[in-house]
Image (cartoon, rainbow, N blue to C red):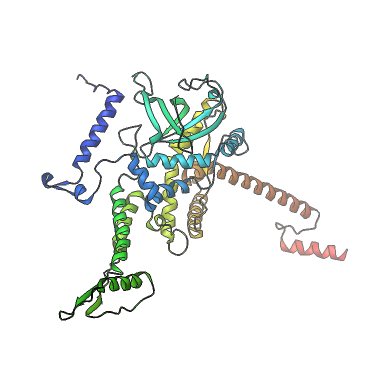
Amino acid sequence: MKRTTKPKRNPREALLTQIARTLFTGRLLGQQYGGDRNLYDALGYPEVLGYEDYDTQYSRQDIAGAIVNRPAETTWKGGVMVSGPEGTDGEMSKTWKKLWKDLKLKNKFTRIDKLATLGRFAVLYLGFNDSVGESIDLESEVSGKPSILYVTPFSEEMVTISEWETNPGNPRCGLPRIYTLSRIDDAGQNTQVFRVHHSRVLHITGETLESEVYGIPYLQRVFNRLMDLEKLTGGSAEMFWRGARPGMTGNVNPDWEAPDNLKDVLNDQMNEYDHGLRRILINQGVDMKSMETQISDPTSHVKVQIDMISAYTGIPARILLGSERGELASSQDRDTWVEFINTRRGEFAEPQIIIPFIEKLMSLGILPDTEEYSVEWEDLADVSEEYRAKVGLVYTQALSAYGNSTAAAEIIPPEEFMKFILNLPESTIEAIIAAREKYLKEMEAQEEEERQLIEEGLLPNPNQPQEEQEQEETEITEE
């Protein structure tokens, strides 16, 4: 059978196709009854979203900020340790600690995390010492053994993919080759624009489907819910503003002749009533009555929106609202949140940020080049004691079952059991092994000391019959 292969599209053509698909999909959003009803148009939802929409929502709305900030900030809470085969005292660990401190990697990784999930992608520019000076060509690939001086996060808004790799024989075919980065000073006056080779940046995306370059912004699927929250919270404030003091009505006696200055007198009294301490209105021929207060509690409506946002993002509602501490957050919420962050560390932060950063520095000789290394995260500081107790119980039960099985160690050695079954970090396994060896040595020393004391007759021999022990003790006493 003759096989036919679909010709590979040019990256530019693929990008234009993606844009056209996005615009076409935007026109279909909210269409019902053959196009007679457009929910998006009726409810005021934008059909096509861009980075500016997400950035504006993130900058101005509290919940939008929490959706992006809380996962990123909790993910990078504490520190990240990278160790080679030598363990925490090896060259890899020592070099990583220095880079972590000197480059302020915790701050930079947290920022690039937020930017990558806020937009379709973000890049982390790596400043090497070969790029110091005007004569350096940043469009050339990094080579040699440079030193890294700094790292700088750039959002999608400040990055343009200028050239793509189109060579089918290149492993990077279809990926960016040259980036154009824009940098604006803090005063917002001077803009620096420079083109850089892909080897000088880390390209980071959030959730991806077809594209390896453009991800799905974190706020995209909840954007309508965020707009609904604005309507509910803003509308409730406006409702209170208007409904708590709905106004007054005046019934005029039909037989009463109003004096010429009535309008001015009533205006003065109403102004004093609204803005001063007057609570009595004196007038003739006009019966003033306060209108009924019309205020509705929006709590249940807001909860629906928060629950839907929580369902997509995976952030428990109480933690999304900032009540993760104290009695308001249940232990189940905290456990769910810890599990969510640990999963995010393993499936996003490591493969998208840490590992590419390590591999890049190892290829340039900045970090020791080794085939085996481990990435270890610090435990979350807000893990509850109840959660720790549950984890400890599970480990204890697993170890008890393993230790009581005579054939278990023959199938899986203890070190491999701790690594692959209990999924313990390398440093923890090393610490356990070291503690076990220390304990065994102490036990051997103690047994040797007891044996010598027994030989000298200073301690009873536990293996000697009781009658012989009593006879020896009697003889020693008589002597």
Give the x, y percent position of residue 234: 32, 58
Q: How many labels does the image show?
A: 0
Q: Residue 344 sits in which quadrant? A: top left
Q: Residue 5 sits in which quadrant? A: top left
74 up-or-down from 477: above or below: above
User: Foreground: 48 or 14?
Assistant: 48
Question: Of all residues shown, which one is farthest toward the right?
Answer: 479
Q: What residue appears at the point 33 percent right and 56 percent down from the top-left corner?
A: 306
Q: Indicate left or right for 23 with 189 as reference.
A: left
117 up-or-down from 288: above or below: above
Q: What residue appears at the point 35 percent right and 18 percent down from the top-left corner?
A: 167
Give the x, y percent position of residue 102: 59, 37
Give the x, y percent position of residue 55: 37, 43
Give the x, y percent position of residue 453: 78, 54
User: Is residue 291 among the parts visible in the rendering?
Assistant: no
User: Is residue 357 among the parts visible in the rendering?
Assistant: yes
